[in-house]
């Protein structure tokens, strides 16, 4: 077994994130120490991942004498709501998933969030293992214990903090992602450099194109570095009373753009994060917080990666700047009517502030729409 480990040190909720190629094939060896006499796990997945990888997981578990039962939900964001959540919880009960059993979340962010929330509420909490199959889920949603589903009123409004017992990030599985999905996940990777570590951003400027082209060692290192940064932040602020909000760099812009484009194929979440990061640096520069070179450097890297970085890169029409800024006030990061932004004093130096004049946000978006 060859893998690298990031430990998430949260007292009695501490766990490992193991990162490497081939972990699905070895899943049984990693999960067996968590099981008691009953050598069986309960796998929640989606139909796309099931078709590609469920046989491999089954074989990887069987190699260590572990049986599995599985439920494949429809792929896509609409699954992350009450109907499929209810289906998953009732399936776990029908399959007699008991208090000491393990639920396995095998998929991207939708499955990880839904399965984690199912585990959080089933019998008042059972343990779960995350096996994230997208880059986005490996570097963000599978780590840190945010679980939940969407409400008609907004994304992720129903949920719980429930930490996994183990995360297995199999780098080889990323090979089946489309380039667009891989690069969308990269939107979250570059965010870590921008928010807290200029040396990571520099490393990505050098190595990003090769890792996007498929280099496994570079992919492993990018996931390790991202997860280590997330683990450090989650250790300081598990329930987002302060520093954890830094992980939302680019997300205030992203959420409004996702909402304006219908949460679909026009703009993937990670693409919105990348554009949002570029806008957050542009806003920071115009407010005199960071140099003019910083937003140019962010955009240059995204362009070098072949990623969307400007509002004009989003296909189709967007609402007016006024409408987009009004929509921002619906964001769940509004506290006492004040919009909170993550701004930056430079690459790797992000901070949270509510002190952002509406006019400045409006102008950045207006100029972005004008191209
Ligand atoms: N995805 C942001 C967080 O985990 O806090």
Image (tube, helix red, strand yellow):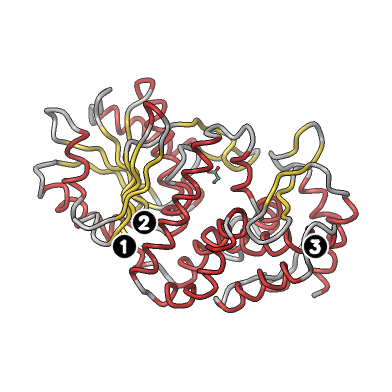
Ligand 1 quadrant assignment? top right
Q: CA distance from mark 3 to mark 1?
A: 39 Å
Q: Quadrant of residue 53?
A: bottom left
Residue positioned 82% across, 35% down in the render:
337
Q: Residue at x 37, y 31 (%)?
A: 119
Residue at 73% across, 56% down: 345
Q: Which residue is mark 1?
A: 173
Q: Is mark 1 within 8 Å of ligand 1?
A: no
- In the rendered image, residue 59, in percent from the top left (x then y), is placed at 14, 53
**Precedes in sequence: disc 3 or disc 1:** 1
Q: Is residue 229 left or right of residue 247?
A: left
Query: Most extreme residue toward the top, as rendered?
Result: 124
Establish if 79 lies above or below 298. Answer: above
For the residues labelled 2 and 1, the Cα–Cα distance comes to 6 Å
Q: Nearer the viewer, mark 3 or mark 1?
A: 3
| Viewer-nearest residue: 37 or 262 | 37
Q: Is residue 315 above or below residue 354?
A: below
Earlier sequence position, callout 2 versus callout 1? 2
């Amino acid at each position: 077994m060859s893998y690298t480990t990031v430990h998430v040190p949260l007292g009695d909720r501490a766990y490992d994130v193991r990162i490497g190629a081939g972990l699905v094939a070895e899943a049984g060896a990693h999960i067996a120490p968590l099981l008691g006499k009953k050598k069986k796990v309960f796998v929640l997945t989606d139909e796309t991942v099931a078709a590609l990888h469920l046989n491999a997981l089954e074989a990887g578990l069987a190699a260590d004498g572990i049986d599995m039962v599985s439920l494949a939900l429809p792929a896509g964001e609409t699954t992350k709501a009450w109907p499929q959540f209810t289906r998953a919880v009732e399936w776990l009960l029908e399959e007699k998933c008991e208090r000491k059993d393990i639920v396995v979340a095998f998929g991207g962010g939708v499955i990880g969030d839904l399965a984690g929330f199912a585990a959080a509420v089933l019998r008042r909490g059972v343990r779960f293992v995350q096996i994230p199959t997208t880059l986005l889920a490996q570097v963000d949603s599978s780590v840190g214990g945010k679980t939940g589903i969407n409400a008609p009123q907004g994304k992720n409004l129903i949920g719980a903090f429930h930490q996994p017992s183990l995360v297995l990030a199999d780098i080889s599985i990323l090979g089946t992602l489309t380039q667009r999905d891989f690069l969308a996940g990269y939107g979250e990777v570059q965010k870590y450099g921008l928010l807290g570590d200029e040396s990571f951003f520099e490393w990505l400027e050098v190595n990003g194109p090769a890792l996007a082209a498929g280099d496994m060692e570079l992919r492993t290192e990018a996931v390790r570095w991202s997860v280590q940064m997330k683990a450090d932040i989650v250790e300081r602020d598990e329930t987002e009373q302060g520093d954890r909000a830094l992980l939302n760099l680019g997300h205030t812009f992203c959420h409004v753009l996702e909402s304006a484009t219908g949460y679909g194929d026009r703009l993937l979440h990670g693409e919105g994060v990348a554009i949002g990061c570029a806008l957050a640096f542009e806003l920071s520069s115009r407010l005199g917080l960071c140099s003019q070179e910083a937003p140019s450097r962010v955009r240059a890297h995204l362009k070098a990666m072949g990623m969307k970085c400007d509002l004009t890169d989003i296909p189709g029409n967007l609402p007016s700047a006024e409408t987009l800024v009004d929509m921002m006030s619906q964001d769940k990061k509004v506290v006492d009517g004040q919009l909170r932004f993550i701004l930056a004093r430079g690459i790797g130096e992000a901070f949270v502030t509510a002190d952002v004049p509406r006019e400045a946000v409006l102008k950045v978006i207006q100029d972005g729409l004008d191209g």
